[in-house]
Amino acid sequence: MKIIADMHTHTLASGHAYSTINELARAAAEVGLRGLAITDHGPGLPGGPHRFHFCAMRFVPRTIAGVRIFRGVEANILDDQGRLDLEPDVLEQLDFVMAGLHEDCGFCGQDIERNTRAILAAMENPRVKCISHPGNVVFPARYEEIVMGALATQTALEINNSSLMSVSRKGSNANCAEIAALCARIGAPVMIGSDAHICQGVGVFEDALKLLAEAGMPEGQVINASWQRLLDFLGIEEE
Ligand SMILES: [Zn+2]
Ligand SMILES: [Zn+2]
């Protein structure tokens, strides 16, 4: 299995990341990726960009250094109704909306029922194509329900490489393995993301690929293992 696009990366705009879009794109080209999603945090995360940042992504070229750029966001799920921190008209302008639960955004992660409801509700939003790091140990959820929801709404669950490297969300490996095994059994779509916060991290997928292999994940369920499958999933027609 070869991952052809990194669908989760952050630029300087996130407030706690260290590269530009151009640097990420050149890094993606160097490691042989065909596509790159720029998914800066939504405005709800402390230090995150204003919503104008996302409106202005129309100025970002479709291709940089030969790499197709997907204009995206990693939006914050704010409550158990699945409300996000970007308005629908802004989400509409982006190629790829990922949503996830984060600390310090006003959502308390102590309650497994509330976490589950929040993720399920976000997946009902047709603009949301992926849930970022659903295995986050800080926000435990009922994973079988989440995976069933992912299948029903055709929302990918991310296997986040950074969660597995103990650089972020330390202690999440068992949850990620459980989610991968459930996705493989139930047939729900998954995406792999590096969650790079600096250009050197683009395209680093080894731990996530190992986890998927251990889970016996069919390649056909991994959205960003095929260019055409990815475009179809995002509803994008090749220019
Ligand atoms: Zn995140
Ligand atoms: Zn992220």
Image: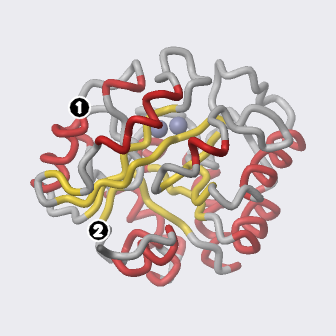
Tally of numbered discs: 2
User: Badge 2: few (under 14), some or many (20 or more) residues near its Cα, within 10 Å?
Assistant: many
Identify residue for label 1.
20
Query: Which residue occupies 70% across, 79% down?
Result: 186
Query: Which residue occupies 86% across, 34% down?
Result: 111
Query: Which residue occupies 50% across, 32% down?
Result: 41
**Which residue is situated farthest in the top direction here?**
47
On the picture, is 222 further left or further right than 227? right
Q: Quadrant of the N terminus?
A: bottom left
| Residue type beneath disc 1 | Thr
Q: Position of residue 184 (x, y in %)?
A: 60, 76
Identify residue for label 2.
4
Q: Position of residue 206 (x, y in %)?
A: 32, 57
Q: State the separation of the CA atoms marked 2 and 1.
A: 21 Å
Image quarter of residue 230: bottom left
On the picture, is 178 further left or further right than 60? right
On the picture, is 90 further left or further right than 87? left
| Residue type beneath disc 2 | Ile
Q: Nearer the viewer, mark 2 or mark 1?
A: 1
Question: Secondary structure beneath disc 2?
Answer: loop
Q: Is residue 130 above or below residue 165?
A: below
Q: Position of residue 231 (x, y in %)?
A: 42, 73
Mark closer to the chain start, 2 or 1? 2
